[in-house]
Amino acid sequence: EIILDYGRAEGGYPVFGIRCQADSRRHIKFRIVYSETREGIDKADGDGPYFLFSNAMDTYRSIEYTVPTSSESRYYEARFSQGSLRYQKIILLSTHCSLIFDAIGLMPFRSGHESKCRFSCSDPVLTQIWEHGLRTVDKCTVEKGQTQPAWDFLEDRTRVYGQHWAPCRHGTRWADKVVRFQVKIHQGGASWGIHMVANGLIFCLDVTTRELKAFEGLADKSSVFPSKLRGQWALPYNISLQDWTSVLVQTSGSSATVVIDGRTITTLYDLDIHPLLGGASNNTGSIALGGPAGWVTDYRDLAVHGLDGNELYRNPLTSAEQDRTMLDFGVGTNTVACTIDGAKRDRSVFGGDLFILGQAVAYSTAQMEAVKGSIDLLSSHQTKDGYLGNLCPIQAPLHDEHQEVPTYAFYSLEYALLLVIAIKDYWLHTGDDDTVQQVWPKLCKFIDFVQSHINHQGLVDAPPPLSLTFLPLGGPIFGPATHINLAYYQALCSMYHMSECILTSTTPFNALATTLSTSILTHLHNPKTGLLTPSTLLPSYTQQSLSHALFLGLLPSHPSHLPLLNPTSPFPPPAFPSTPPFPPNLISPFTSSFAAEALFATQKGPDAISLIKKVWEPMTRPSDPNYSGCFWEALTLSPSPGPSSSTSPTTPESSTPTLVPAHDDTSLCHGWSTGPVFLLPKYLAGLRPTSPGWKKWEVAPVVAGVRKVEVEMETVAGTVGVRVEWGEGFEGGWVEVLVPGGTEVEVNVPEGWEVVGEGR
């Protein structure tokens, strides 16, 4: 085997040119394994698999090839992309042969976007952090039509290539049903799933072993989420798998029966499949088509009926139905430009990630069409009672509001609220009144939905399926959750600001926000500790809720705050305390962005810079074997000595903690980790819009121990710029501002300072 190291994370379609030599065999087998992390490349499946809900990339990270022997170089291009990798391992599986690579690499998805913002400062570490964030932003932005279709469409059939299971979006609430279709196996076997949204009951029909296996989970093998084998059955000898084979699956209550070519193969009982997403009832979900890596199967004549005979869905799966099939199963290209959570996985749009990434885009590449596309895609999904979409695979279509909305679009109430705030931020940077006016009725309906969950304490008390935090493995927060109520408070403030372009708006958003803030302090705040509890039912605190409340100006100052947000030790603070139900020692760039902004907003600039360096600087070290050139999804402290352990105990390097990815499939290029991209220019230079489209803007630099800061960025109103230089001891300084015509800027000095001289 050979391991290739690209030096940093890269993405695209794997390509290679090879020559094969062998004694007598006609074909040679080899395997290619991919990983972002150094640890992952030593595993059989790399840093995969990771399944969930995206068809936009390879999910297995371990691909086997069979190629003919040839003395001439042949060119191959992988069908599925690798969203992000640093390491690539080639394993020769055949014996008594040789494999010569004339070329190997990645065909990029697209060329990189040039930054429309230039940031530099006298601290090279901060400049380096900003530049790594810029690269992360670019890799987590997808142009319209960038994703390639996952399936092929022939005249009378659809060819499905295994690597994922794609559910039909029309059936995410189906319960009892009868599913019929035909399959013709080309390689490996045929596979399908029922009760599927992200997870469900998956059947794999292996053509070699002539066995049918059933798995409960996301796939035929475990990943972060486990898959459980529910049974395996040998096929009767008189069932042929050489031509078209008919399949019937009937579900009723907690049972599922499989019939192949008219022969009942099995009935499973006592099913209790809980959907990971959407909050639908157990044992509900859609029909999914797909398969393990390497399987290739044709499908045709798909029909789904209720047990009463009522037709729920029909699709002949012919080439004439190509466009409909790609939209129904989410296997086509992405119809809008959008942002994604992670480059390697899940390549989906999340409202929570957009809250951070949307601001980072505005202060870097200015690809605001990707922010708008994300807003359009998420907001097109809304339930009849008003719950707003906050998660969507990028290959899903804009939803037709006249149809029942798929349950895959709903992750958490907090993420839906953060989407509202992201829309306000987008509006300030673009001045796009049309988009605000278009989504306004949906936003108002959503606010009514949230208000319907206000309890007797005046707090939002959402049911568990709506109460997840940013960490899905941590489960929901029970009781009125602080992170949801704080997000609702800021969403109400955002609605108030956006209402200026809605002349007919009459909802008293400010009054609702004031009432909510009183309830938060009354029922969630502990005056003795100065902290907010995670909910009315949980003690302690979380980094995000404490930070968010301070940024919003809701919490009175308390001595406990600073040691929790930026402890004096060199170790970054954890996202959660080490008490159940929270995972210990998790360091989150997502929640650390809240903390850094809270420190900036409360004029604790040096502490904000200290925190940013503790969390983000370790990810910018090229010597780290997990260096990706981008920012990671989550981190934890290394349990073993890191690369600097050989240095003298007296050197600064030896006291620096070694941070590693939090778990095996951690994304090392993640959109929600791009906070410094907007925090540094927004606070060190104090540069931010105060009215839509930068018609009015502000310069309010925060003293943070950084002597010189220079920012220049292209906006819809023209190029704005700020140059700040502080004097000796930071006891004075000067500000130079570049103001485009037709705009108005207000320059504010730090609290307690005064302007002693003005330029022109």
Image: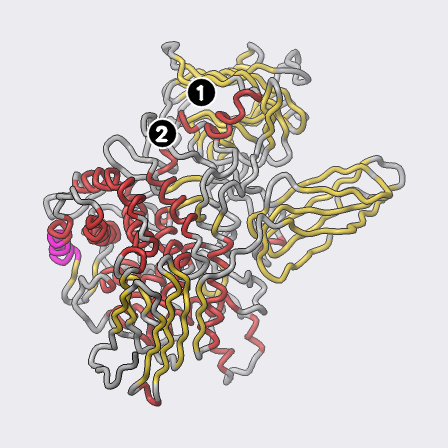
Crowd around label 2: few <14 · some 14–19 · many ≥20 (10 Å): few
* Pointer 1 residue: 256
Quick check: 615 above or below 446?
A: below
Q: Is residue 711 visible?
A: yes
Is residue 734 inside the magenta stretch? no
* Pointer 2 residue: 400
Pick the residue in front: 294 or 702. 702
State which quadrant residue 168 falls in: top left
Magenta stretch secondary structure, dominant: helix
* SS at badge 1: strand
* SS at badge 2: loop
Residue stretch in magenta: 514-524
Q: Which of the labelled discs sits on residue 387, or is there none?
A: none
Q: Amino acid at mark 2?
A: Asp
Image x and y of residue 304, in percent: 44, 17
Q: Residue at x 23, y 71 (%)?
A: 560
Separation of marks 1 and 2 at Cα, in angstroms = 31 Å
Tag 1 near tag 2, CB within 8 Å: no
Q: Split into 4 quadrants, where in the image is the C terminus?
A: bottom left
Image x and y of residue 309, in percent: 39, 9
Q: Amino acid at mark 1?
A: Ala
Image x and y of residue 184, in percent: 63, 20
Quick check: 635 above or below 70?
A: below
